[in-house]
Image (cartoon, rainbow, N blue to C red):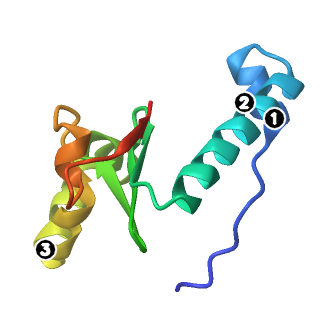
């Protein structure tokens, strides 16, 4: 939808910003993705917490991204976000509080949490 192109992750930029080697960044990301893939392959419910962004929830055949309100507010501006939520109330389903227990976001109440 929206014909958006995916951009490859810029490992070198992440490494520079995090003050670690590119090899370490690649190794960590591949390790997390491998474990995530293994858990999903076994049918586990998984929540991947992206600090300051939100939570990626994978449950059954359903994948859902829940964003922290303040993250979206920073991207779009407080007034623009309020207008968007007013025009499209379904956007509220994509928002989550930073203090909400991650398990409460799932239907089952059980998830493997990737902090």
In the rendered view, does 72 fall on the left or right side of 41?
left
Numbered mark located on residue 92 in the image: none
Residue 63 is situated, as x and y percent measured from the top left of the image, at 42, 67
Q: Residue at x 13, y 73 (%)?
A: 89
Numbered mark located on residue 89 in the image: 3
Residue farthest front in this picture? 42
At mark 3, the secondary structure is helix
Q: Are marks 2 and 1 in contact (CB under 8 Å)?
A: yes
Q: Nearer the viewer, residue 113 or 14?
A: 113
Q: Residue at x 79, y 43 (%)?
A: 10
The picture quadrant where one finds residue 18 is: top right
User: Height in image: 67 above or below 16?
Assistant: below
User: Height in image: 3 above or below 115?
Assistant: below
- Mark 2: few/some/many CA within 10 Å (<14, 14-19, 20+): few
Q: Say which of marks 1 and 3 sits in front.
A: 1
Q: Nearer the viewer, residue 33 or 90?
A: 33
Q: Residue at x 58, y 61 (%)?
A: 41
Q: CA distance from mark 2 to mark 1?
A: 6 Å
The picture quadrant where one finds residue 80 is: bottom left
At mark 1, the secondary structure is helix
At mark 2, the secondary structure is helix
Q: Which residue is mark 1?
A: 26
In the rendered view, does 113 fall on the left or right side of 93?
right
Q: CA distance from mark 1 to mark 3?
A: 38 Å
The picture quadrant where one finds residue 45 is: bottom left
Q: Which residue is mark 2?
A: 28
Residue 95 is situated, as x and y percent measured from the top left of the image, at 23, 55
Q: Nearer the viewer, residue 26 or 17?
A: 26
């Amino acid at each position: 939808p929206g014909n958006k192109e995916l951009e490859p992750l810029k490992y070198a930029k992440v490494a520079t910003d995090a003050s670690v080697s590119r090899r370490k960044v690649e190794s960590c990301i591949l390790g997390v993705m491998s474990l995530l893939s293994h858990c999903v392959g076994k049918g586990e419910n998984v929540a991947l917490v992206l600090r300051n962004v939100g939570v990626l929830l994978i449950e059954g055949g359903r994948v859902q991204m829940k964003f922290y309100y303040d993250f979206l507010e920073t991207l779009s501006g407080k007034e623009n976000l309020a207008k968007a939520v007013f025009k499209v109330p379904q956007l509220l389903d994509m928002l989550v509080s930073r203090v909400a227990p991650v398990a409460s976001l799932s239907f089952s109440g059980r998830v493997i949490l990737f902090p």
